[in-house]
Image (spheres, rainbow, N blue to C red):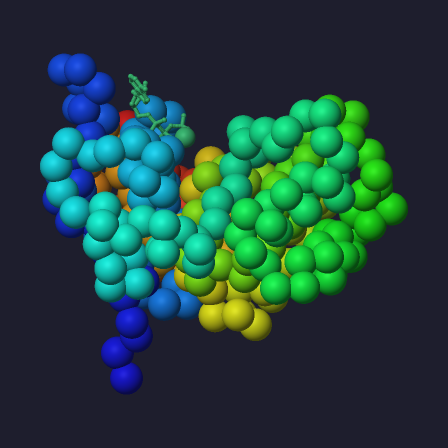
Amino acid sequence: MNKKTVLEVKNLVKKFDDFVAIDDISFSVKEGQIFGFLGPNGAGKSTTIYCILGLIEPDEGEIQIFGKDLKSCRSEIMTQVNYASAEFILPWNLNIWENLLVYAKLYEVPNGKNRIKELLEVFEMSHLKGRIIRDLSTGQRVRINLCKALLNKPKLLLLDEPMASMDPDVVDKGIKLLKQIQKEENMTVLYTSHNMWEIEQIANNILFINHGKIVASGTPLELTQQVLRLEAEEPNLRDVFIHLSRS
Ligand SMILES: Nc1ncnc2c1ncn2[C@@H]1O[C@H](COP(=O)(O)OP(=O)(O)OP(=O)(O)O)[C@@H](O)[C@H]1O
Ligand SMILES: [Mg+2]
């Protein structure tokens, strides 16, 4: 049976004055996919994600989420979408519990307090729930960002370098947790990272962009075979990344 398309981006163009940051990209993401969205610094990944969130308006193109037009149905769509990035900063002076409560209310999460408790346990942060965000370590802040991103059990989760600057142990745990939650809820995930080990662990499909254009796509192994050598038997996204970024 054909899987539903959760996200469809058609001929997206985004310019900043004369500079073309996104240059006519089209792609679609199916239900339950974990889609690795890769590219060098400045390739246009975050800009694309901001367009998908409706935070910036594209100059051309269309975005459909759950089969609905983003422009005309944004509020309805966003109740089932969420986002996390290591750069995203929660209100600094509120503690963890207060922050998550605000977001649970905004997302109208049923049994919000229980959902917060559940996520804090999963991410091993319950003991710190009274600590203000400013006083958390970077890794702790990332875990809280992920709790926030999962509060509304999103059908589409956009993760823009969610684990940047995490220690390998935290990344490993984070990836395992995300994979487990993704499976349980059949969540669709768009995931960017510069850590190719992380991408190989989590993504089942890859889209590679450079200078705002799509340059390659496929499963990690397909991409390795296309870009490096046909006989490859294991994905090697690090070498694929280097090759595509330099070519
Ligand atoms: N508001 C803006 N005004 C002008 N240029 C911008 C703006 N936002 C992004 N850009 C430019 O658009 C390009 C794409 O930026 P973007 O942040 O999408 O890259 P990225 O792929 O997320 O890179 P990174 O891996 O470094 O996060 C860059 O050249 C950036 O300088
Ligand atoms: Mg970025």
Specify the quadrant that holds the N terminus.
bottom left
Outermost residue on the bottom side: it is 1
Left or right for 179, reference 240: right
Left or right for 71, reference 125: left
Specify the quadrant that holds the C terminus.
top left
Q: Is residue 229 visible?
A: no
> Which residue is depicted at the point 59% across and 29% down?
89
Residue 128 position by quadrant: top right
The answer to which of 9 and 58 lies nearer the viewer is 58
> Which residue is depicted at the point 52% across and 37% down?
85
Q: Taking 240 as reference, is 235 above or below it?
A: below
Residue 23 position by quadrant: top left
Outermost residue on the top side: it is 17
Q: Could you say where residue 191 lies in the image, as x and y percent from the top left?
A: 44, 47
Q: Could you say where residue 92 lies in the image, as x and y percent from the top left?
A: 68, 25
Left or right for 19, reference 117: left
Q: Taking 17 as reference, is 235 above or below it?
A: below
The answer to which of 155 and 239 lies nearer the viewer is 155
> Which residue is depicted at the point 22% across and 50% down?
72
Q: Could you say where residue 113 lies in the image, as x and y percent from the top left?
A: 73, 57
The answer to which of 11 and 202 lies nearer the viewer is 11
> Which residue is depicted at the point 72% across and 45% down?
169
The answer to which of 98 and 178 lies nearer the viewer is 98
Q: Is residue 43 visible?
A: yes
Q: How many marks?
A: 0
Outermost residue on the right side: it is 127
Residue 241 position by quadrant: top left
Image quadrant, ligand 1:
top left
Q: Could you say where residue 19 lies in the image, as x and y percent from the top left?
A: 18, 18
